[in-house]
Amino acid sequence: MRPFEYAHPETEAQAVELLNDHGGDTAILAGGTDLIGLMKQELLSPERVVDLQHVESMRGIAPTPDGVSIGALTTLEEIADSQLAVDYPSLLNVVDGHRSIQIQSMGTLGGDLCHLPNCWYFRNGYGLLATEDGESLVEEGDNRYHAILGANGPAKFVSASRFAPALIALGAQVRILGPGPEDEETVPLEYFYITPKTESQGVNVMKPGQFVSHVLLPSAVSRDAQLAKQSAAYEVLEIEGLDWPLAAAACSLEIDGGIVRDAKVVLGQVAPTPWVSHEAASAIIGRPLTEETADEAGRAAVASARALSKNEYKIWQAKTAVKRALLAAAGLPTGGL
Ligand SMILES: Cc1cc2nc3c(=O)[nH]c(=O)nc-3n(C[C@H](O)[C@H](O)[C@H](O)COP(=O)(O)OP(=O)(O)OC[C@H]3O[C@@H](n4cnc5c(N)ncnc54)[C@H](O)[C@@H]3O)c2cc1C
């Protein structure tokens, strides 16, 4: 690991200043479960690390007039122990999928949302686009865990965040601070992620010197219809331990009189960004949610998927994840393909 300067602000304003009053590269440290590894491997070598752990205003969960605000430093464990787990069950599904007490107590929501891809070419120094001499290493290489949707361009990795699909389905926004002292913007999480076309573009809309301070969730009750939003997430995991999902899906539904009035379906771990499937939502809106309609939605979600040489299995897993997330949100048994 290269030497670096360590800064520990106590306020959001100090954090913005410390990230931006330095001429060189800076990096945000939250739980540190991923960043420290990236620095040890010298995949990232910031000159200054800004540790947000002492910024109290970025911790915990608080009600807002429209819903709830979750500090980016809130740990997975704090989410599981809160009212969020009751009102937004999809978030509890995601925490439960992290089968590691250590990660649940150290990993933060902001760290999950900003997690860099797990693509093994990226993690071995070949960059986000995983190229050598201008050629993609993924197309003909070991692409078992790469993207099946949205990967027609040079980026073939899958978005790492496990919370993003559930949060996007719930209509979350992120509050972004910096780089200027007064700069603050609120961005729908759905539009936070980008698929890079060049190595320098990154995986989200944040510019250097910016960070996520909070996630804002709308109320779990729909304002128009006064219906409770029903949500669930389903992750396909290869082992009964800490691992990254092979495919995932999350949804939020409004069901009235047995008919789906509104739906949002988002896939994870299958594309360079969380993947909103309007096709899956259209397949169930205006219809009762049954095993058959959930299955149709799953098929619609992957209709445009394109497998690489070694990951066709992900298409079937993604289809099943959508079906099971929908059935779980509706309180129905989730078994079967
Ligand atoms: C050995 C090991 C194995 C792991 N395996 C798995 C696994 O199999 N599956 C799994 O789901 N998780 C795994 N994790 C955990 C994963 O790293 C965490 O789940 C979590 O995503 C990271 O949260 P963090 O707060 O520790 O992030 P950090 O490591 O602090 O940060 C992660 C990234 O996000 C950036 N960042 C953090 N917070 C912000 C913010 N507020 N604004 C902007 N950028 C920010 C950082 O700069 C960094 O690039 C593993 C961790 C370890 C140590």
Image: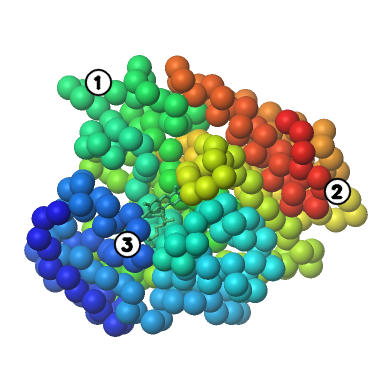
Residue in the image at 54% along x and 22% along y = 312
Q: Between disc 2 and disc 1, whose residue precedes?
A: 1
**Nearest to viewer (mark 3 / mark 1):** 3
Quadrant observed for ligand 1 in the rendered image: bottom left
Q: State the quadrant of the N terminus.
A: bottom left
Q: In the figure, is residue 199 to the left or right of 225?
A: left
Q: Secondary structure at mark 1?
A: strand
Question: What's under tag 1, amino acid-wise?
Answer: Glu
Label at residue 135: 1
Residue in the image at 53% along x and 53% along y = 99
Label at residue 172: none
**Res 54 → quadrant:** bottom left
Asked if labels 1 and 2 touch by Cβ distance under 8 angstroms, the answer is: no
The answer to whether residue 214 is above or below residue 256 is below
Residue in the image at 37% along x and 42% along y = 118
**Nearest to viewer (mark 2 / mark 3):** 3
Q: Gap between marks 2 and 3, in whole Å?
A: 44 Å
Residue in the image at 57% along x and 52% along y = 97
Q: Find residue 78 and report its horizontal and vertical position in percent.
A: 53, 72
Q: Gap between marks 2 and 1, in whole Å?
A: 49 Å
Question: What's under tag 3, amino acid-wise?
Answer: Gly
Residue at the disc numbered 2 = 259
Q: Between disc 3 and disc 1, whose residue precedes?
A: 3
Residue at the disc numbered 3 = 32
Q: Find residue 221 and report its horizontal and vertical position in percent.
A: 72, 67
Q: Between disc 2 and disc 3, whose residue precedes?
A: 3
